[in-house]
Image (cartoon, rainbow, N blue to C red):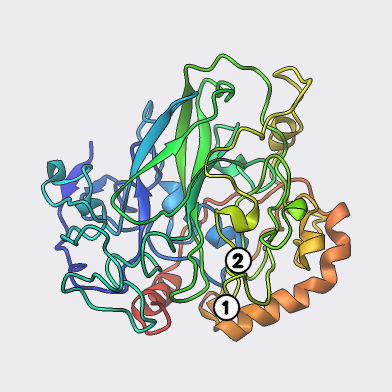
């Protein structure tokens, strides 16, 4: 039986707090202490930057993957319909805690004006980057919000969900912004296995701070499914703002960038607005708004999907090639997960270290075709030292 606790809320006024999509079925909804239901939990919220694959994938570095939802609890995905999540910096500011008493229309539990922006602050302060500081949405206004997405893998064990079998099925442009976000589900989504699927939410900010990413996992279940064509094996998205013919067609992987290994997206230069390029779940990377209706295999039965079949291989750490890291042309090859990597203080490396890592990995692009076909599990718990490193990073000046 879970013991419900209310750790004192320290986030009010903390401009460095970030955001996550809260919903039933999510991992570490109750926190990361066994037997404790922490209604002030923010464990899935911290950003992921310059980490190893074993740490950032599914937000494993602080133990989130070790705390699944209760048996039978799923994020429900109605085929052809939509579902809602609450994007907030702490569970306390959602309907999942205190019967919603601390929730407002915004993810920080505060009240902000309609059309909240850097020119309509309603008394809120700007961040050091000249962006909205609370909630820390990494944007100046709603129209500049980067967009976020949900992906799905047709496996029931989170350790078997990998970039190679997890396809984006829904995108919501201009999120995160207000608390409630709605995601549309393709009508042709096939049913999940009896024990459900694994889903993930992802968000890559459009500047306004460190070049990090956010993600975390859910047990999910497609409801009302009538179609049987499987979801195709996803490929990495590519920057295609300047030429839509370069966009990755069909099923696409989650965006992974600025990590120590496993990156599948690489951008440089400036976008059409003259700002530094930031990959995101939007048209710049070839993602349509709403349900992703082009992700299914054609002329296939519900069995034999390359997506589903590849996900059944047992995890392995032997004879593994280096993870892909190269130019946008190389990233169009299907990503295969990296070998297990030991955790170290490199998780706290600077932006220049991340750039150096990506550059050095570029030489390994030619090995993509022969890379390993299985992925490491992601159930490792964080050590006390890594937790301390995270606290310093998350609350230090490097995070805006």
Of the 4 image quadrants, the one containing the C terminus is bottom left
Q: Nearer the viewer, residue 334 or 299?
A: 299
Q: Which mark is residue 247?
A: none
Q: Is there any visible trace of residue 322 in the rendered image?
A: no
**Could you tell whether 106 is left or right of 382 in the image?**
left
Q: Position of residue 166 (x, y in %)?
A: 62, 42
Q: Position of residue 8 (x, y in %)?
A: 14, 63
Which image quadrant is residue 208 in? bottom left
- Is residue 50 placed above or below 182 in the rendered structure? below
- Secondary-structure class at tag 1: helix
What residue is at 68 percent from the left and 21 percent from the top?
229
Check the image and name the residue furthest to the top. 226
**Could you tell whether 234 is left or right of 91 in the image?**
right
Of the 4 image quadrants, the one containing the N terminus is top left
Label 1 sits on residue: 346
What residue is at 17 percent from the left and 50 percent from the top?
103
Q: Residues within 10 Å of mark 2 (few under 14, many from 20)?
A: many
Q: Nearer the viewer, residue 223 or 311?
A: 223
Badge 2 vs badge 1, beta-carbon distance below 8 Å: yes
**Sequence-first disc among 2 and 1:** 2
Q: Residues within 10 Å of mark 1 (few under 14, many from 20)?
A: some
Label 2 sits on residue: 52
- Is residue 327 placed above or below 97 in the rendered structure? below
Q: Position of residue 213 (x, y in %)?
A: 51, 63
- Secondary-structure class at tag 2: loop
Check the image and name the residue furthest to the left. 101
- Is residue 244 placed above or below 1 in the rendered structure? below
What is the C-alpha distance between the residues marked 2 and 1?
Answer: 9 Å
**Could you tell whether 200 is left or right of 87 in the image?**
right
What residue is at 39 percent from the left and 33 percent from the top?
83
Q: Position of residue 310 (x, y in %)?
A: 74, 36
Q: Is there any visible trace of residue 274 in the rendered image?
A: yes
């Amino acid at each position: 039986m879970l013991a419900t606790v209310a750790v004192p809320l320290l986030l009010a006024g903390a401009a460095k707090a970030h955001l996550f999509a809260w919903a039933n079925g999510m991992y570490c909804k109750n926190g990361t202490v066994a037997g404790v239901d922490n209604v002030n939990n923010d464990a899935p919220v911290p950003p992921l930057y310059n980490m190893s694959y074993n740490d950032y994938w599914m937000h494993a570095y602080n133990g989130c993957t070790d705390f699944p939802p209760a048996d039978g609890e799923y994020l429900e995905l109605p085929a052809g319909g939509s579902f809602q999540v609450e994007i907030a910096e702490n569970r306390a500011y959602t309907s999942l805690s205190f019967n919603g008493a601390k929730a407002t229309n915004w993810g920080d539990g505060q009240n902000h004006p309609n059309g909240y922006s850097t020119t309509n602050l309603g008394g809120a302060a700007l961040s050091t980057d000249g962006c909205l500081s609370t909630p820390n949405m990494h944007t100046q206004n709603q129209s500049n919000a980067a967009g976020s997405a949900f992906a799905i893998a047709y496996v029931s064990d989170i350790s078997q969900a990998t970039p190679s079998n997890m396809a984006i099925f829904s995108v919501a442009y201009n999120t995160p912004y207000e608390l409630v976000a709605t995601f549309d589900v393709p009508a042709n989504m096939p049913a999940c296995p009896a024990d459900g699927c694994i889903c993930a939410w992802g968000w890559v900010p459009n500047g306004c701070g460190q070049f990090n990413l956010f993600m975390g996992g859910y047990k999910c279940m497609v409801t009302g499914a009538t179609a049987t064509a499987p979801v195709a094996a996803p490929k990495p998205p590519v920057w295609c703002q300047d030429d839509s013919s370069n966009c990755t067609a069909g099923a696409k992987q989650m965006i992974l960038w600025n990590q120590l290994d496993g990156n599948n997206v690489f951008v440089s230069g400036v976008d059409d607005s003259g700002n530094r390029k930031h990959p995101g779940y939007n048209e710049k990377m070839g993602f349509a708004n709403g349900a992703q209706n082009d992700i299914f295999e054609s002329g296939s039965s519900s069995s034999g999907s390359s997506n589903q079949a590849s996900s059944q291989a047992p995890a392995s750490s032997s004879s593994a090639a280096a993870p892909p890291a190269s130019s946008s042309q190389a990233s169009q090859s299907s990503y295969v997960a990296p070998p297990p990597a030991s955790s170290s203080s490199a998780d706290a490396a600077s932006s220049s270290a991340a750039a150096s890592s990506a550059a050095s990995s570029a030489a390994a692009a030619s090995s993509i075709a022969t890379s390993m076909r299985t992925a490491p599990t992601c159930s490792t718990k964080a050590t006390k030292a890594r937790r301390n490193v995270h606290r310093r990073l998350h609350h230090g000046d490097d995070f805006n």
